[in-house]
Image (tube, helix red, strand yellow):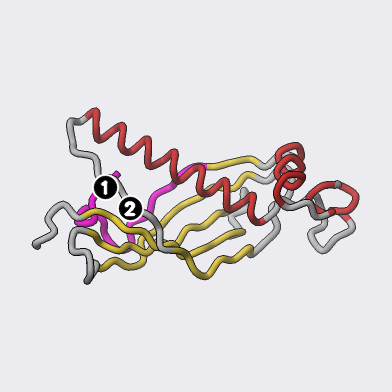
Amino acid sequence: MRYFEDMEIGARREVGAFTFTAEDIKRFAAQFDPQRFHLDEDEGRNSLFGGLAASGWHVASVCMKLMVADGKRMAAEAAARGETIAVWGPSPGFRELRWIKPVLAGDTISYSSQIEAKRTSEKRPEWGILQARNTGINQRGEIVFSFLATAFVPRRSPGS
C-alpha cells in the first residue's frame, strides 16, 4: 500500500474484473438479498431488469474483495522491493452509492478507483484523508456501479 504523499489527485488504478454467473448471483441472493429477481431467471426476465440480476450489494461486495486483493498485491510488491508498507486505517464511510445499470448473469464488471480529493487530517496529523471514486464498468463499456469512498491513509512525514 502507498503513503498519502505518494498519491496524486486524478490517479486511477484498475483493481480487477469479475464475471457474475447465475450460480453466484443466486447463492449471494439466497443468503443476503433474497428478492425474486435475484433468485429466479423467469422472475428476472419479467422484472424491470430483463434478466437474472445481481444484487447491488453483491456488486459492491465484489468491488471490496477486488480492492483488498489489489492492496495486498501492491503491498507484496513493495515488500519485495524492500519498501516500508503503509498500513491504511479504517474508512469513515462512503457517499453517493449508485447502482446505475443492472448487472445480469454473464456480465463481466471491471472495477477501478480514481482519487478525487485528499487532505491532511486536522486532528490526526499522522493521517491523510483520501476520497476516491470507485466504479464498475460492464463489458459494453457502461458504468453500472459507482460510489465515493473516504479512507484514512498514513502519512510518511506527518510534520511536512
Residue at image x 90%, y 49%?
Answer: 42
| Residue 6: image location, x then y, percent | 22, 53
Cβ atoms at labels 1 and 2 below 8 Å apart: no
Quarter of the image for the N terminus: give it.
top left
Vertical position of residue 104 compared to residue 75: above or below: below
Frontmost residue, 80 versus 35: 35
Circle 2 sits on which residue?
89
- Number of numbered callouts drawn: 2
Highlighted range, magenta = 1-16
Frontmost residue, 158 versus 47: 158
The image quadrant that residue 11 belongs to is: bottom left
- The numbered mark, 1 or 2, whose residue comes first in the sequence reads 1
Circle 1 sits on which residue?
2
Of labels 1 and 2, the one closer to you: 2
Q: Residues within 10 Å of mark 2 (few under 14, many from 20)?
A: few
Would you say residue 112 sits in the magenta stretch? no
